[in-house]
């Protein structure tokens, strides 16, 4: 830390400003008593003023204000030189004779001793003032030196105490950072948690996260707290003149202590960007593996102590881990979603039937599901059996890559069981898949509806078996909607010897059969029965519309529901009797 910044940081730690402090007032009283002067001050030099936390005898209005501008300050000369300033008559000294302190404060005789911190920074002066010319004796100056030494010790104790408190706060900050960032769900959540992580006087005015994208750094913007400059400058080139770009290029932490350093070392665009946010100082730390840069910025000059620098660098390490984890999860989820999408069936063309499907991933990207649908044509069988449509929908228990993989296995096994059985019975096919769950490490189980649509005179006959799945919905041409409620237990990972049942009903032209997973009807704030009633109402009202529009109407409530599960829907409309061509 540079000398001036170190001095400013020490003043902040001391916690003294233009307000009375009992301990500092005591030192001022001791000066008046030992040196027999009318005015004594504990004067500390800030950037644009001197303040008097300790004061005796100063005239109004300065006594009430406990501060003066620097054009009325002799203390500044003590601070700049680091040496005592002793004047018998300030009106005769070239350094002070033009100061307003002489004419307005009647500072004629002055003796000021440096007040220093443990690092040797001169913070101000302990001074004795007389309104008349005066010859300071060696004994008086010796006493003033001793009192200044004692006052410096008091300042150092206060600074050390505050530093210990800050160190304790920093330790707590690191603990909070490790917990909060481990809980972050996405990159915008990382920024949100970072901005609420800090408190106290050292709290950054702005926290920004930029991620590497080729030769650019792109901002991660918190949607609830978008600053205008973030929208105006969503990215910057790695070779640009911003402090964060330098940190990325040079792969080292970059500290900008104040606005003067910003103007001297960085581009006009960078200065304009910081000015737009009202910022003057910054600390930029590159993330591991060249992932990006984390930036803290403050209004005004900022003194970055060794401990604070270490803490912020450690937090950047936690952010690196969070970004790495999210990139891994994104890659894994992308693979899982691609796997899942690849296994969703392309619908066959069946005369007399119209079909449409919808798959909606979960809002929470961690919840990659095992929902699937399937539809395919069975060829004609022996004895003149006509070809028929097999349709199924199901949900493997779990929400991860494994669930998506098991979904593919279950769908394939159900196809094989159906194609391999002479009677092509839905119940027998489900029983065969359940036997596989009991014999193979496929997980805890699944739910499914497996159905067959056979040509039957001028309509279609539906045969289905339900393994613990939400009931299919059937809309008749007059708009009435019913649930096909009959069902058995879900497919389990243990053989229980269950005889799975089949059910039948006829479906006339104009009817719509809806197969769906529980993501369509489950909400956090209501039970599944209420969700089924909502779906029935929508199906009744919109069942005459083209199937893609019907599916959009059914899914609209799901998309607007926070935290929704993934969802698969298969809609089948009977457009005519068997053999009918659209």
Image (tube, grey):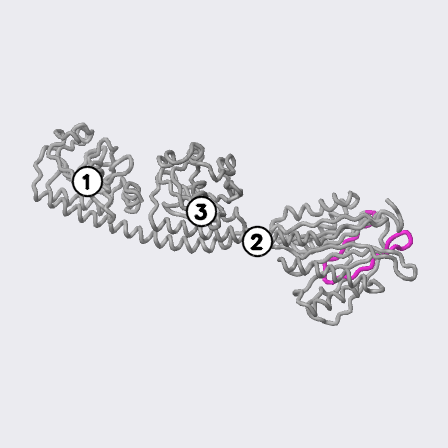
Name the residue located 13 percent from the left edge and 37 percent from the top edge. 86
Res. 207 visible in picture: no
Quadrant position of residue 452: bottom right
Viewer-nearest of discs 2 and 1: 2
Task: Give the structural element (helix, strand or loop) at label 3.
Answer: strand
The quarter of the rendered structure image containing the N terminus is top left
Magenta-colored span: 454-478
- Circle 1/circle 3 CB separation < 8 Å: no
Between the C-alphas of marks 1 and 3, the distance is 46 Å
- Circle 3/circle 2 CB separation < 8 Å: no
Q: Earlier in the sequence, mark 3 or mark 2?
A: 3
Name the residue located 19 percent from the left edge and 40 percent from the top edge. 41
In-image side of 333 versus 352 (left or right): left
* Mark number displayed over residue 126: none
In percent of width and height, residue 260 lies at 35, 35
The residue carrying mark 3 is: 286
The residue carrying mark 2 is: 329
The residue carrying mark 1 is: 41
In percent of width and height, residue 187 lies at 52, 48
């Amino acid at each position: 830390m540079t000398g001036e910044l170190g001095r400013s940081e020490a003043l902040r730690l001391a916690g003294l400003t233009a307000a009375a402090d009992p301990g500092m007032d005591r030192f001022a009283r001791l000066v008046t008593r030992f040196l027999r002067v009318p005015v004594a001050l504990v004067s500390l030099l800030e950037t644009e003023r001197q303040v008097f936390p300790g004061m005796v005898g100063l005239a109004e209005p300065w006594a009430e204000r406990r501060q003066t501008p620097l054009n009325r300050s002799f203390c500044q000369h003590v601070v700049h030189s680091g040496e005592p300033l002793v004047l018998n008559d300030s009106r005769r000294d070239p350094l002070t004779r033009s100061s307003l302190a002489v004419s307005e404060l009647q500072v004629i005789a002055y003796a000021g001793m440096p007040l220093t911190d443990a690092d040797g920074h001169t913070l101000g002066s302990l001074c004795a003032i007389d309104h008349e010319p005066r010859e300071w004796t060696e004994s008086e100056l010796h006493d003033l030196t001793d009192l200044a030494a004692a006052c410096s010790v008091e300042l150092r104790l206060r600074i050390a105490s505050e530093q210990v408190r800050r160190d304790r706060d920093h330790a707590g900050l690191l603990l909070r950072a490790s917990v909060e960032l481990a809980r972050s769900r996405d990159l915008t959540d990382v920024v949100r948690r970072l901005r609420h992580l800090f408190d106290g006087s050292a709290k950054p005015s702005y926290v920004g996260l930029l991620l590497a994208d080729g030769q650019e750094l792109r901002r991660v913007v918190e949607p609830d707290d978008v600053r205008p400059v973030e929208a105006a400058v969503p990215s910057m080139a790695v070779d640009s003149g911003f402090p964060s770009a330098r940190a990325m290029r040079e792969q080292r932490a970059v500290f900008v202590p104040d606005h003067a350093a910003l103007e001297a070392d960085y581009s006009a665009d960078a200065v304009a960007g910081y000015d737009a946010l009202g910022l003057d100082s910054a600390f930029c730390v590159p993330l591991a593996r060249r992932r990006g840069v984390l930036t803290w910025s403050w209004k005004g000059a900022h003194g970055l102590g060794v401990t604070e620098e270490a803490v912020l660098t450690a937090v950047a390490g936690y952010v690196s881990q969070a970004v790495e984890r999210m990139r891994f999860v994104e890659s894994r989820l992308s693979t899982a979603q691609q796997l899942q999408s690849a296994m969703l069936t392309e619908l066959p063309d069946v005369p007399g039937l119209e079909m449409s499907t919808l798959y909606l991933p979960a809002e929470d990207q961690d919840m990659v599901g095992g929902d699937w649908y399937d539809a395919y044509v069975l060829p004609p069988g022996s004895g003149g059996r006509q070809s028929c449509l097999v349709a199924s929908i199901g949900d493997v228990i779990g929400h991860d890559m494994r669930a998506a993989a098991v979904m593919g296995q279950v769908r394939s096994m159900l196809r094989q069981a159906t194609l391999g059985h002479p009677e092509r019975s839905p119940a027998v096919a489900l029983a065969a898949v359940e036997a596989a769950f009991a014999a193979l490490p496929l997980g805890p189980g699944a739910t499914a509806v497996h159905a067959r649509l056979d040509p039957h005179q001028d309509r279609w006959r539906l045969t289905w078996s339900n393994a613990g799945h939400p009931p299919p919905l059937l809309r008749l041409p007059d708009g009435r909607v019913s649930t096909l409620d009959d069902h058995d237990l879900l497919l389990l990972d243990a053989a229980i010897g269950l005889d799975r049942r089949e059910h039948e009903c006829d479906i006339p032209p104009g009817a719509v059969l809806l197969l769906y997973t529980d993501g369509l009807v489950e909400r956090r704030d209501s039970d599944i029965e209420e969700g089924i009633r909502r779906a029935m109402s929508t199906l009744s009202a919109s069942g005459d519309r083209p199937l893609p529009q019907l599916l959009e109407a059914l899914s609209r409530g799901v998309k607007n529901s926070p935290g929704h599960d993934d969802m698969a829907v298969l809609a089948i409309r009977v457009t005519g009797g068997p053999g009918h061509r659209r």
